[in-house]
Amino acid sequence: MSDERALLAVEREIALLFRRGRAKVADLSRQVHPELEGMAYSMLGFIEQAGRVRPTDIGAHFSVGKATVSRQIRTLEEIGLVAREADPLDRRAALVSLTEDGADRYLRVRNARTARFRRLMETWPQDDVERFADLLKRFNDLTDEPVGPAER
């Protein structure tokens, strides 16, 4: 396969992965709670991993604006999945964390998702799974680099 064909094949497969990923995250969000949309599942995962986190850090992590984060957190708070408290280091700021119900719902869906990944990957030799993880990390590291002038 030529370099150009290989690059086009990678681009095509990445685009397919992204399209499927967006649809899957929306589905996972609805599995956590039927009123959730889009990135809520990913946001819950970030909050679960962080423990307590400032909304500004959520926005920075997902590269979304303050209004988007505020709207998402407000929805999560209204349905009882997250709680907001004053940041003890800066009373003007808030910290967001999962409620017990939020953690239970998120972990139930995440564990089912992890079990599905396990079933999908069990046909691959362990070396292939490890290599795939390494290659994905390398790719993600590359895509996190600043865009050069020629790419703008």
Image (spheres, helix red, strand yellow):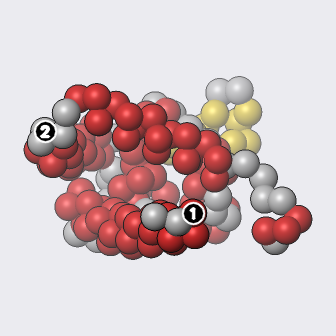
Q: Is residue 59 visible?
A: no
Residue 3 - label: 1
Amino acid type assigned to the residue bearing label 1 in the image: Asp
Q: Amino acid at mark 2?
A: Glu
User: Height in image: 151 above or below 138?
Assistant: below
Helix or strand or loop: what does disc 2 sit on?
loop
Could you say which quadrant of the image residue 54 lies in?
A: top right
Above or below 26: residue 82: above
Q: Seen in the image, is 40 located left or right of residue 85?
A: left
In percent of the image, x 78 and y 59: which residue is there? 147
Q: CA distance from mark 1 to mark 2?
A: 31 Å
Query: Is 110 positioned to the left or the right of 132 in the image?
Result: left
For disc 2, the marked residue is 122
Residue count near mark 1 (Cα–Cα under 10 Å), binned few <14, some 14–19, many ≥20? few
Sequence order check, earlier mark of 1 and 2: 1
Residue at the (61%, 42%) spot, across then down = 141
- In the displayed structure, does residue 149 sit left or right of residue 113? right
- The residue closer to the viewer here, 68 or 22, is 22
Disc 1 secondary structure class: helix
The residue located at (46%, 44%) in the rendering is 136
Q: Nearer the viewer, residue 23 or 125?
A: 125
**Residue 103, position as x, y percentages in the image:** 29, 40
How far across and how far down the image is residue 149, in percent?
88, 65
Give the percent coordinates (x, y) of residue 35. Answer: 29, 71
Residue at point 29% right, 36% down? 128
How many other residues sit within 10 Å of disc 2, few (<14), some (14-19) or many (≥20)?
few
| Rendering coords of residue 37 (x, y %) | 36, 70
Relative height, residue 76 to residue 11 (above, below): above
